[in-house]
Amino acid sequence: MKKYIKRISLLLAGILTLGMLSACKDGSASEDGASSEQVQAVSKVSNEYRVELANFEQWKPDFSLIRIMENFGKVSRNKDEKYVKSGSYSAKLQPTGGIYAYRKPQMYIPFFSEYYNFNYEDFTYADYIDLWIYNANDRDMPVNVGLVSAITSEEAITTFPAETFYLKANSWNLVTYYVDFNAMSINQSISLSQIMQIKGLYLEFESSNTVDVNDAPVYYVDDVNLYYKDEPNTLKDVSEILEFTHEEGSDVYEICDFEHVYQKYVFSTYVKNAACIPTLTIVNAENEGMDGFLATSGSSVLKIEIPAGQTKGGSWTELILSSKIMSAFYNEFVFDSAKQKPIVPAAELKNYYIAYDIYCVGEVENDYKFAHYLYDSQNNTYARTEGAPNLMIKPDQWQTWSWSLYDVASLEYTRNSILDPTDPTKYNKGVAEAYQEYKKSYDKYAADPLTAGYGDRITDAGQFRILYSEHVGEDRVVYIDNIRVYKA
Ligand SMILES: [Ca+2]
C-alpha cells in the first residue's frame, strides 16, 4: 500500500474510512476493496495525507503515463544513485525544445487513469504538490510548475498559469508548488467545476534550442507528492483578492508593486519565438547582487530574464498585465462602473498618469525601446496603440514610463466613437452623410474631448501590455516595479 502514505491515522470526521485511502494506483484493490468510486472521493482527506503521484520505482504507471509535448526531448529511467532521491530509480529528463517552437519543452503527469484505476482530479481539498528535481547543469535553471486544465489531444493540453522556481546548479532542489486558485484566477477565469477536474501536473523547462538530446540540459525528478488540507479551496471574487495599496492623502495609487503573493500571476506573456520566452519571477531587489539596487516600492520587483534570439527585431514579446487588475483598479480609483460615475473628475484627468519603473541591466543598443498598448478589455483583441508612448532604454538605472489618463480617455473616445467615415453602415446613412456626421462628432471631440459624451467614460483601461523586440547577443535582465497611477 505504498501509494498512500499515512502519517497519522486521523481522518476528517465522518468523511472517509481508512480503507478508501488505501486504493492502489496499480489497480489492485485495497484490503477492504475500495472501488474506483471511493477512490474518486480521496481528496476529502486531511492534510496529514498525501498521495504519491510518482516515485519512478516502476515503469508502470509512473513512466508509462508521463506525457511529453512536441519538442520535449526525452524522458528515461535513471538508476545512477547520485541522481536518485529515494528508492532505486528516478526519471531522467533531457528537454530540448524546438528552435522555433511556440512553447518551452513541456511534460505532464496525469491525475487520472482508467487502466490503473486512480483519479486525483478533484482538487477541492488539494493543498500543495512537492517534488525533487536534480539540476545536473552548471548554472541555476528555471522550471515552471503548474496544473493542466484540459487535455485536448495527444499533443495538446491547456494549462493554468505556472509558477516559476529556480533550481540550484548541480544539486537536489525541493520544489513546493502551492495550489492557489484565487491567485491564478487573476489571470484566468476558473470555475469550481474546473477545480474538481484538474488533469495533471505539468513542468516546463528552458528551451535548449537544439533538437539533439545529447546537447540538452539534464534534470532528474523523483518523489512527486500531492498533499491535502482540511479546508476546501474556494473561489473568491477578484475584488477580494486584489490589494491596491493607497495611503490616505498620498497622490500615488498602487496597481501592482509585487509585494503580494498573488502578484506572481499578474503577468502572462505572448511570445512568437520560443527561444525568446522570458522567465518572470518576483525577487527581493537587495538579493540581486547589484550594489545599491533597490525596489522603487517596497522590497520586491518583477525580474524579467530575456533570452537572446536569432534576429534583431525578428519578433516581439508582450508582457500582459491582466485586464482583471486594470478593471478592478479603475473601478476603485478612476471610474465607478456600478454607479456609472467618474471618481477622478474628467476635468482632472490631465493631472493623472499611469506609470511604472523599469531597470535594464547592462549595455543595450541605443534604439532599444519598450512599447505599450492598452487592449480592449472585453475581448482583449483590440489594440489601442496610437498615442501610447515608447520608452527608450538607458542601461543600469531606474527609468519611469508614464502616460496621461487624459490621453487614455481620448483614445477610449476615439475607439468608442464611430469615427470611420468610410463605413456608412455604422450610421445607416450614405457615405457623404456619414462623413458629415463623423466630422461633427470629431470636431466636437477635438474641441473638448472630456465633455463630448465619451471623454469622461474611461471606464476601463483593459489589458496593459508592455512590448519589446527580439535582440541578439547576450541574454538580458530587466526589472519592473511600482505599476501605479499618480497625480502630478
Ligand atoms: Ca515592489
Image (tube, helix red, strand yellow):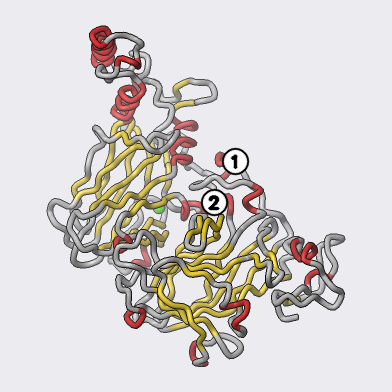
Report the disc number at residue 183.
Answer: 2
Identify the residue at horizontal 24%, vertical 62% (top origin). Answer: 309
Report the disc number at residue 165.
Answer: none
Q: Are marks 2 and 1 in contact (CB under 8 Å)?
A: no
Q: Quadrant of the N terminus?
A: bottom right
Residue 158 spot, x, y in % from top left: 50, 55
Identify the residue at horizontal 30%, vertical 32% (top origin). Answer: 488
- SS category of the residue bearing label 1: loop
Residue 113: quarter of image: bottom right
Identify the residue at horizontal 34%, vertical 62% (top origin). Answer: 101
70 above or below 168? above
- SS category of the residue bearing label 2: helix
Q: Upstream in the sequence, badge 2 or badge 1?
A: 2
Give the crowd class for mark 2: few <14, some 14-19, many >=20 residues within 10 Å. many
Cβ(mark 2) to ligand 1 < 8 Å? Answer: no
347 above or below 50? above
Specify the amino acid type for callout 1: Asp
The one nearer the camera, 330 or 265, is: 265
Residue 140 spot, x, y in % from top left: 38, 75
196 above or below 286? above
Specify the amino acid type for callout 2: Ala
Report the disc number at residue 237.
Answer: 1
The one nearer the camera, 432 or 49, is: 432
The one nearer the camera, 449 or 118, is: 118
